[in-house]
Image (cartoon, rainbow, N blue to C red):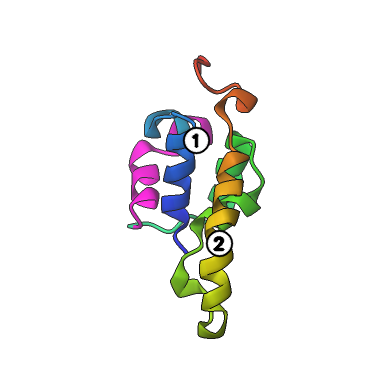
């Protein structure tokens, strides 16, 4: 599971800079960068805060963060068949227009 990469993917989909998201989450830009690159693992509190700021359910982060290594060998076939569609649907739920974040003054 790569939570940092999921946060980065969603942040980029929303056209939000690292600095903007970090500021809104009351994190340093360096901390957010370390989370996104996997140097630092986010706490549950940080994940909750990011989701609150982005106005998305935490489940979206976990769906996007899922990796093949997280799946038991007996379920890999189902994962390969279903996961791309589930991930795509989760990302479609993330919308800059819905959030009103694009062009918003901090």
State whether residue 18 is above or below residue 101: below
Please, what secondary structure does the residue beneath circle 2 have? helix
Q: What crowding class fits label 1: few (fewer than 14 Cα within 10 Å), some (14-19), or many (20 or more)?
A: few
Residue range in magenta is 22-38
Q: For residue 26, which numbered disc appears in the image? A: 1
Is residue 71 one of those drawn in magenta?
Answer: no
Q: Position of residue 33 (x, y in %)?
A: 34, 44
State whether residue 53 is above or below residue 51: above
In this picture, residue 7 sits left or right of residue 18: right
- Residue labelled with disc 2: 83
Q: Residue furthest front?
A: 81
> Do labels 1 and 2 touch, CB within 8 Å?
no
Residue nearest the viewer, comparing 84 with 10: 84
| Prevailing secondary structure class for the magenta stretch in the rendered image | helix
Q: Residue furthest right?
A: 57
Residue nearest the viewer, comparing 72 with 20: 72
């Amino acid at each position: 599971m790569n939570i940092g990469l999921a946060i980065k993917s969603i942040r980029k989909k929303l056209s939000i800079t690292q600095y903007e998201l970090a500021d809104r989450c009351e994190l340093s830009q360096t901390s957010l960068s370390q989370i996104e690159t996997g140097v630092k693992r986010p706490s549950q509190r940080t994940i909750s805060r990011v989701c609150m700021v982005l106005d998305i359910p935490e489940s979206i982060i976990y769906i996007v963060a899922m990796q093949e290594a997280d799946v038991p060998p007996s379920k890999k076939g189902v994962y390969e068949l279903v996961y791309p569609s589930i991930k795509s649907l989760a990302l479609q739920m993330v919308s800059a227009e819905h959030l009103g974040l694009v062009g918003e003054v901090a």
